[in-house]
Image: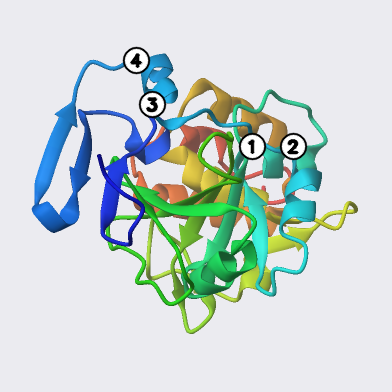
Amino acid sequence: MAGFGSSSVVGAPGQRSARGGGRRVGVMGDELRLRLEGLSDDEFERLFGAFRPMAPAEVAGLLDGLGAPWWVAGGWAIEAFTGVHRHHADLDVSILARDIPVLVEHFLGSHHVWAAGSGLLQPLLHPAQRFPEWAGQIWVRREATSPWLLDVLITPDRDGRWVFRRDPDVVEALERVTWVAADGVTYLRPEVCLAYKASLDRPKDTADLEATLPRLGAGARRWLRDTVARLHPDHRWLDRLGAGPDEA
């Protein structure tokens, strides 16, 4: 069984980037890899624990005093902008990659922090610990018998500036791609959320597009249309993203 040292890696629950393919459990120091195939999400949850997604206000309390910028993305950000209620299976919180040590230090002594990605989990036990290259998220829970509370998406940055994961040539000041709502929570701008969602193109992503478009300004709509056209030239959203009333 993998231990809790910095060299330990265990298979991650069947969510997000951990979905798909066989799950695996390994001990990196021994170069051992065990592939667990055919497990349902329920079976995997019994092994590694459940998620209890939090609402933005709860996350604000948990991250109070963090000392680094964080923001909410995904469906919650769309709802905050549009005011249109939708179902939420999870909550996407993000930080800049340079602030990973700050997040780890914030939770020292109160929560367990794990690097997650590529079907793997690895504990982060101190701020100076190297963040593994295969990880793109951080999962947080109080202790081993508690549900996971946070799934923190790691956003690449360039000298503290936000880098668009879908197109690393797009680099902006964080203040230009986020906004602060009346509840005091910082959210990713809706056009940026939709640019991420375009690559997934699930029914809920289309619903988010339809809820957002009537409320989106001309500049934001143009940025979204140009970004989707550049990344997905044949995307079915492009017709819908044609010139709006104030651009005709």
Q: Quadrant of residue 165?
A: bottom left
Counting residues from the start of the chain, the first of labels 3 and 2 encountered is 3
Camera-nearest label, 3 or 2: 3
Residue annotated with mark 3: 47
Counting residues from the start of the chain, the first of labels 1 and 4 encountered is 4
In the depicted structure, whether residue 35 falls above or below residue 226: above
Residues marked 2 and 1 touching at CB (< 8 Å): yes
State whether residue 215 appears in this view.
no
What secondary structure is marked by label 4? loop
The residue furthest bottom is 159
Please, what is the three-letter code of the amino acid marked with disc 1? Gly
- Distance of mark 1 from mark 4, alpha carbons? 25 Å
Residue annotated with mark 1: 75
Residue, x 39% and y 72% (percent of image)? Answer: 129
Residue annotated with mark 2: 79
Image-based side of 113 in relation to 48, left or right: right
In the depicted structure, whether residue 105 falls above or below residue 92: below
171 and 2: which is toward the camera: 2
Camera-nearest label, 2 or 4: 4
